[in-house]
Amino acid sequence: IWGGEFGRTPAAQGGSQPGRDHSPSGYCMWLAGGGVKGGQIIGATDPVGYAAIDSPIHPNDLHATILYALGIDQHDLYFLHHNRKEIVTVNGGEVITKAFT
């Protein structure tokens, strides 16, 4: 797995410290091994790379997919938080099945 939880905005900002800001709406990840089918592109961004427009994937989906590749059901892996069982994909995650087909 290679990637980050955000991309960069497509346009540079000006000012005294010009640069490109964080963009959580459009970023990419590379996956290999674990049964992942190589040579695929899943999803797409708009023409300038600002936001996902086709098959957007939430980080919880990525977590569920990694656990699936490891043979672990996301609902079976939990940690205790204030004496409550919490799953890693607390807000739900969908396995990215396209990655394996």
Image (cartoon, rainbow, N blue to C red):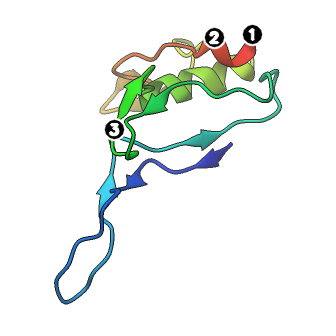
- Point 71% across, 26% down: residue: 40
Image quadrant holding the N terminus, namely: top right
Q: Amino acid at mark 2?
A: Thr
Please give the label number shown on residue 51.
3
Find residue 12 and report its image quarter.
bottom left
Q: Is residue 97 left or right of residue 92?
A: right
Residue that badge 2 annotates:
97
Quarter of the image that includes the C terminus: top right
Marker count (numbered): 3
Q: Mark 1 or 3, which is nearer the eye?
A: 3
Q: Amino acid at mark 3?
A: Ala
Q: Is residue 52 above or below residue 73?
A: below
Q: Secondary structure at mark 1?
A: loop
**What residue is rendered at 58% in x and 24% in y?**
42
- Please name the residue that numbered disc 1 is placed on: 101
Q: Nearer the viewer, residue 11 or 97?
A: 11
Estimate the spatial distance between the alpha carbons at disc 2 and disc 3, rounded to whole Å: 22 Å
Percent position of residue 15, x then y:
16, 83
Residue lying at 58% horizontally and 16% vertically, measured from the top left: 96
